Each structure stands twice: as C-alpha cells, then as structure tokens.
Image (cartoon, coloured by chain):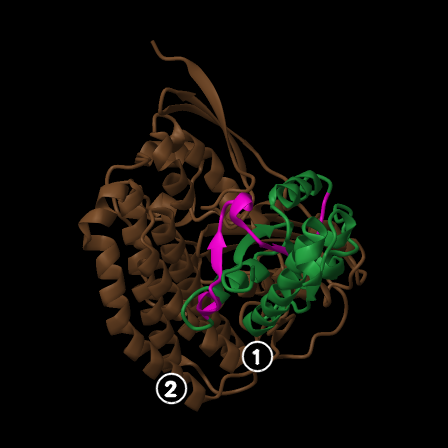
Chain colours: A brown, B green
Amino acid sequence: MSTRSVVPFGPHHPVLPEPLHLDLVLEDEKVVEAIPSIGFVHRGLEKLVEKKDFNEFVYVAERICGICSFMHGMSYCEAVEHIMGVEIPPRAKYLRTIWCEMSRIHSHLLWLGLLADAFGFESLFMQSWRMREKILDMFETSTGGRVIFSVNKIGGQRKDMDNSMIRSFLDIFAGMEKDLKELTGTFLNDGAVRSRLDGVGVLTEQQARDFGAVGPFLRASGVQYDMRTTGYAAYGDIDLEPITSNIGDSYARTVVRVKEIFQSIDIIRQAAAKIPEGDFAVPVKGFPKGEYMMRVEQPRGEACYYVKANGTKFLDRFRVRTPTFANIPPMLETLKGSQLADVPILILTIDPCISCTER
Amino acid sequence: MKMSQSPWLLHYDGSSCNGCDIEVLATTTPVYNLERFGVINTGNPKHADIFLITGGINSQNAPVVKQIYDQIPDPKVVVAVGICACDGGIFKECYNILGGVDKVIPVDIYVPGCAARPEAIIDGVQKAVVLLDKKRQQMDAAVRPAAGRA
C-alpha cells in the first residue's frame, strides 16, 4: 500500500538557476499533485512607472529579465510608440528584428545547456554555452553590452549597425551553423539523451489549449501559434513558418527549440538582405495619452504588455503577462503522474524564467 | 590547510533580473572558465566555501538567504554580485526591495556592474579566495593557539 508524502522542491535547487518552490505530493515515487508558490524574485517594478519618466522606464523594462532584455525593452517602446502615433524608420524595425532573433538564439542555446546540465551531461552543457558566447560577442560588438543592451528608445534605436558589421555577423553565423548542427545532433539523436526525454511529460493538444500554454511548449503539442506572424518590428516582411511538432513530450520541445535556432539564423539572413538605408531613430516630442496592448513572441512564448498613459511624463499603469506565467498551469498538469526523478527535466522543458514571471 | 586550491561556489538568485545569474554561469563555462582555478559550481550549501548571491533582498527571500548562509560551513566568504546585490540598484525604489544582501547577511566582497561582467566576477572570486585562506588561518589559530604561533 502506498502512502502519501510531500516533498519540497526549491526555492534553492541545483537544477534551477532561479528560485521556484513546489510542494510535490507523492505516492511512492509518483507525483500526484504539485502545488507552486512563487514570489521569491518579486520586486514590484511595474509600480516604478509612477516614479520614473516614461523615457527612463525603458531601462527598467529591459531589466524585467536579463535573458530577453532586448525584447522587453523593445516591446515597451513599441507600445508607447503606438500610443503616441510615432512611426519609426524602417531601418530601426530591421535592427530590432535582427537583435530579437540574436536574443532568441542565445536564449535557446542557454536553455539547451541547462537541459544538458539537468540530465547530467556536463560536456554538452559546456559546449552549448561555448557557442552561446559567440552570440554574446556579437551583441557586445553591436550594442556594447553582453546581457543588458540599452539600445532601444522611444522612436527608434540608440545605435546603428553598419553594413560591414552585419556582413561580418553573417559570416560568423555561417561558421557557427556546422558546429550547431553537430551540437544539436547530439541532443536529437544520442541514446542517453533520448532516454531522458522521450515520452516524458506529454501535453496533448487539447490540454495545451485548455491550460493556455504558449511558445515552444504550445507548438510542441501541435498548435501553430507564433506572435511573430502578426508582423511587429519588421516581421511583416519576413518569410516565416511557425515550427511545430505533434508529439507533445520533452523531446518534441527540444526539437522545436533546436529548429527555431536555425530558423532565427534564416530570419537574420533575410533581414540582412532587406535592411534599408536611412535613419535609425526619429525625434519624439510630447507625452503619451491612451492605452495599448502589445503582444510579442519571446523565446519562451507570447508576452503581453499593457501600457496606460495619462498625458503626463508618468504612466498610469504598466502590466506584463510573461510566457512562464502562462506556462505554469500546463506544466503542473504534466507533472501529475510523472516520476520524481523526471521533475527537474519537466520543469526545465517549459524554459522557466522566474524573474519575468514575478517581476 | 590552504582553502584556495579548490574553493567551491554556491550561487543563489536573490531577486535579480537574471542578467547577473547567467553571467555567473557563463564565468564557469569555457570562454571565461573559472574552473581553471579549481572552482566548482555546486548546488549543495554544505559543500560550498564561497556564496555568490545576485539581486536584492525582499521579505520572502530574506529567510531563504539567511538559511543558506547558515548552512554553509565555516570559513565562508559572501560575494554580492551586481549592483542590485550591493545596494538594490535600479530596483532600490521598488516597494518590495529591502536593499542589498548586507541587510540580512554579512557581505565580504562587492562586485559592481549591471549586469556584472564575467571579468569582474572572476576578480571578485579571486579576492574571495584570498580572504578564505585568511579566515581559515584565523580559525586554525583560534583552535590551536600553539600551532598558530609557530
């Protein structure tokens, strides 16, 4: 006869770089229920809009999360630009697209490394992060920062990439592709890796829709849903097909993210071929008045930004719904019935980002 | 006994934006390779010598930080990584930030930056290693006064 026991998971756990606490209710080794508690990283930065000028707030918005910092800053700027009716120059839109996709590649490589670390494949973790450093070098060359860039402003970008720099980046990507194929081949074909991922934590398409999953977690369950197809920044001019898989297990999520790395390189190539000459920022005068809801596709999924402005230099309200927040309920669903030993991998396959969830 | 030969790290995310956390992890991976100094990133407080902490302190994580600090055996060195861990940084004015890590535990080394660069983190860890040896010597001297004098 099995007895129930409760095992605390976190907030400090070796597999998570960030604090998340789960109470796992177990029957022998099987998880019956998982009860989350969050709030260890809550800062309350949304309320800072009442203290900081709406132009200054770009820097705070970037620091919602250090991994998707570029996208947070950009989305806040786009939301305010929509309210103020500012049309940014086409070159700025393409620059945003290129930096967004570079962020996606670095985020997915970071995740692949953490996944490898979670199932104890140390050398694969090191290799993934070694390759990620090349992306960070490109960020440093183009923006001056490794993780926090501060290149967004309301009305465009603070910095431009000249065409020779973009061409040199394309050469680096061409060189990286071979290494990436070898690295991701191990993730997708190695027997030891597959034994940890195949059939673990299956989320059916119906469950994914019912619980409101987003991003690669949703697409791995066979739902074609990618915010980039709505055409913010310069995505309207880019040819892209959302990547899906219909298996819905941890392996499928790995496949989707691996394919997205190559898709991002392709998008950067397309953007580099089409990027127009011209200004990369326009002057913006006055104060915003009105409200807007901005939706973007981050590496972890769809993020929503709500901005409400009252015509002064301070905004009334800023609200972010981040992808991990949406992914926690479906993740708890996949945890039910799983083995205790698979819990760390299952949590990692949603690519949790606690600092954006709690802000 | 010299502790500087292989000091082990424990990393905890207080309430940072992740920027410093991924930089702490990046310092242990190939390009920056902190492991060449014998440093290993461990997940167990009982194995750790150096406590790297990122992000400011809020009322929910204060007891967690305090508990992890208490679990690390002596001698130990605390390194606050990034401006948020030093004094709250950009989030200083947030309603849920009490301030830097030194509000709850004693901090030995402050590493500035937003986000702290890997070079700065390596520098902080190297300073921590020197301090670790010093603390160890003081402990030995307290336990065995004769040996300490010799």
Which structural element holds mark 1? loop
Q: Nearer the viewer, residue A271 or B12?
A: B12
Given residues B113 and A170, the one toward you in this image is: B113
Chain letter for mark 2: A
Q: Residue A98's quadrant in the figure?
A: bottom left
Identify the residue at the far top of this view: A1
Which numbered disc flags the more N-terminal residue, 2 or 1? Answer: 1
Q: Which residue is mark 1?
A: A144
Kind of residue at badge 1: Gly
Q: Secondary structure at mark 2?
A: helix
Q: Residues within 10 Å of mark 1 (few under 14, many from 20)?
A: some
Measuring from the top left, give residue B75's x and y in whole percent.
64, 52
**Residue B84 highlighted magenta (yes or no):** no
Image check: A57 left or right of A346? right
Task: Name the mark nearer the viewer: 2 or 1.
Answer: 1
Task: Name the residue nearer the viewer: B124 or A124.
Answer: B124
Above or below, comparing residue B44 to residue B130 in the picture: above
The span picked out in magenta is: B33-58
- Which quarter of the figure is the N terminus of chain A placed in? top left
Residue tagged 2? A167
* Residues at marks 2 and 1 touching, judged by CB atoms closer than 8 Å: no
- Chain ID of residue with mark 1: A
